[in-house]
Image (spheres, helix red, strand yellow):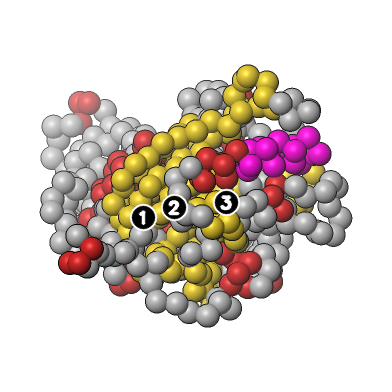
């Protein structure tokens, strides 16, 4: 060794400035001292070889020595983020905002399947397809998944916003524990893949890249030290190439329903993406008994049906948590227009959903982006209809009438101050918006023991959500619930 990094073509040491000089073919056969000349080396070394060299000081194929840095996602090896950045820094200027560190551009091209395999290997010590005995759904393994996902990001990536739990005010009741997550994950076709970036012009553009956000979405799902038993998601447009293959490997099963005419087809027609709703459940604690989807109707101004379907969908699954009574878990995403007409449509869709839930005659849990605020919000531009209907419409179940309740309002005494906080411009977007439109609704038979609060206002950067420190413009809601025990028949009842 000459003390210099290897030549990517010959695999031998040498000064990069010397070896890149043009060498005449006639001189190739001449003997020269190894330290001065190591063969014909092209002036333009391929980028992937430069990455390997800068990240590891080794030639491709050699075993790597740990540098103490997280893996370079593009090269698949460990290395110095500063060195990696020198190779691929053409977009650096677009990634910076004041006070925000640059997150390495070499993150951008890792195939999803490769990243899933890396995550699984890091948190299970097993190759994909092998038996995975460590997947025991414990708090420590939840941390392992978050830590594994974190290790795939450059070292300078900011931490996710801290969040805290608040205990419920209801008197505790014995029952079967269930952890339910509700999360609008922000469609890639409405953000990073949209040439207009979804109007999120205040945030660093590369923080919207799906290759970055998908890792932080995994971190957000698992970083609280708990495994959600059921996860409801909206704006999912990477179901088949990210969420479904990854969560299946982690022991979940799922169902997806795309919107009939996803707005992603308009904002990012080149991408082929279309968003919709997804529902996941843990197969070791939850049994799926039945599942169906629905597409809400369109209505005339007088409330009569038009005979056409809307663009809003829902998934409803009859699930049984081990030891508990069966429940219906649902996910939906109601109309988005923040107008009187939009609110009317949301109330009609909410009414339709509740009437359908009633037919199951079972306790219900609904995770949804209602796109509707609670009543009496200062500065509201129109009266609230959808939310009041959701928590007041009576459902007749086993002879008893009762409405759904908001898990967060039960635990906190009121809804959070916000569940989405963003700045957007263009396409009718109106600057900065902070309000509560995401909910977890539960039947009276279900108790809520605690909920996860949104980040503290003081921690959120001026650019708001999303960004380096949070992967969506909506926060994930996480509620720990208690279900009634399953009724077991005694010998005398058989």
Residue 326 is labelled as: 1
Residue 362 is labelled as: 2
- Secondary structure, magenta segment, majority class: helix
How far is mark 1 from mark 2, CA to CA?
7 Å
Give 273 or 375, whichever is nearer the viewer.
Answer: 375
Q: Quadrant of the N terminus?
A: bottom left
Instruction: Give SS at disc 3.
Output: strand
Q: Quadrant of the C terminus?
A: bottom left
State left or right for residue 234 relative to residue 492: right
Give 75 or 360, whichever is nearer the viewer.
Answer: 360
**N-terminal of the two: label 1 or label 2?**
1
Q: Are marks 3 and 1 in contact (CB under 8 Å)?
A: no
Residue count near mark 2 (Cα–Cα under 10 Å), binned few <14, some 14–19, many ≥20: some
How far is mark 3 from mark 2, CA to CA?
10 Å
Instruction: Give SS at disc 1.
Output: loop
Residue under label 3, please give it. 395
The magenta-colored residue range is 334-351
Residue count near mark 3 (Cα–Cα under 10 Å), binned few <14, some 14–19, many ≥20: many
State left or right for residue 141 relative to residue 452: left
How far is mark 3 from mark 1, CA to CA?
17 Å
- Mark closer to the observer (3, 1): 3
Residue 483 percent coordinates (x, y)? 41, 65
Q: Are marks 1 and 2 in contact (CB under 8 Å)?
A: yes
């Amino acid at each position: 060794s000459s003390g210099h990094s290897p030549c990517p073509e010959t695999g031998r040491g040498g000064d990069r400035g010397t070896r890149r000089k043009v060498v005449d073919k006639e001189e190739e056969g001449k003997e020269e001292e190894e330290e001065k000349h190591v063969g014909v080396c092209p002036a333009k070394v391929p980028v992937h070889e430069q990455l390997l060299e800068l990240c590891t000081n080794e030639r491709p194929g050699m075993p790597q020595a740990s540098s103490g840095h997280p893996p370079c996602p593009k090269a698949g090896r460990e290395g110095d983020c500063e060195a990696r950045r020198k190779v691929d820094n053409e977009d650096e200027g677009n990634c910076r905002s004041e006070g925000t560190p640059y997150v390495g551009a070499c993150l951008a091209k890792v195939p999803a399947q490769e990243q899933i395999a890396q995550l699984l290997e890091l948190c299970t010590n097993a190759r994909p397809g092998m038996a995975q005995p460590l997947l025991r759904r414990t708090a420590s393994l939840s941390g392992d998944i978050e830590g594994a996902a974190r290790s795939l990001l450059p070292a300078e990536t900011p931490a996710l916003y801290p969040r805290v739990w608040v205990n419920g005010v209801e008197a505790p009741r014995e029952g079967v524990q269930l952890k339910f997550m509700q999360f609008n994950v922000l469609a890639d076709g409405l953000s990073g893949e949209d040439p207009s970036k979804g109007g999120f012009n205040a945030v660093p553009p590369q923080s919207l890249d799906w290759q970055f956000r998908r890792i932080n979405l995994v971190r957000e799902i698992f970083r609280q030290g708990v495994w959600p038993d059921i996860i409801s998601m909206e704006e999912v447009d990477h179901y088949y190439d990210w969420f479904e293959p990854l969560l299946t490997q982690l022991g979940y099963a799922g169902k997806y329903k795309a919107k009939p005419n996803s707005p992603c087809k308009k904002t990012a027609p080149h991408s082929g993406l279309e968003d919709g709703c997804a529902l996941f459940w843990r197969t070791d604690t939850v049994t799926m008994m039945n599942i169906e989807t629905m597409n809400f109707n369109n209505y005339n101004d007088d409330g009569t049906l038009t005979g056409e379907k809307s663009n809003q969908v829902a998934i409803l699954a009859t699930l049984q948590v081990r030891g508990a009574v069966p429940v219906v878990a649902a996910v939906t995403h109601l109309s988005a227009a923040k107008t009187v007409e939009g609110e009317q449509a949301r109330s009609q869709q909410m009414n339709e959903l509740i009437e359908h839930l009633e037919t199951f005659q079972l306790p219900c849990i609904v995770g949804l982006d209602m796109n509707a605020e609670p009543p009496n919000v200062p500065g509201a531009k129109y009266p609230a209809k959808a939310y009041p209907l959701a928590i007041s419409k009576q459902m007749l179940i086993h002879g008893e009438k009762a409405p759904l309740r908001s898990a967060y309002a039960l635990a906190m005494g009121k809804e959070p101050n916000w569940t989405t906080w963003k700045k957007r411009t263009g396409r009718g977007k109106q600057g900065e918006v902070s309000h509560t439109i995401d909910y977890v609704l539960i039947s009276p038979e279900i108790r809520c023991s605690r909920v996860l609060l949104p980040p503290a206002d003081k921690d959120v950067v001026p650019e708001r959500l999303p960004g380096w420190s949070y992967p969506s413009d909506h926060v994930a809601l996480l509620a720990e619930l208690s279900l009634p025990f399953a009724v077991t028949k005694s010998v005398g009842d058989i």
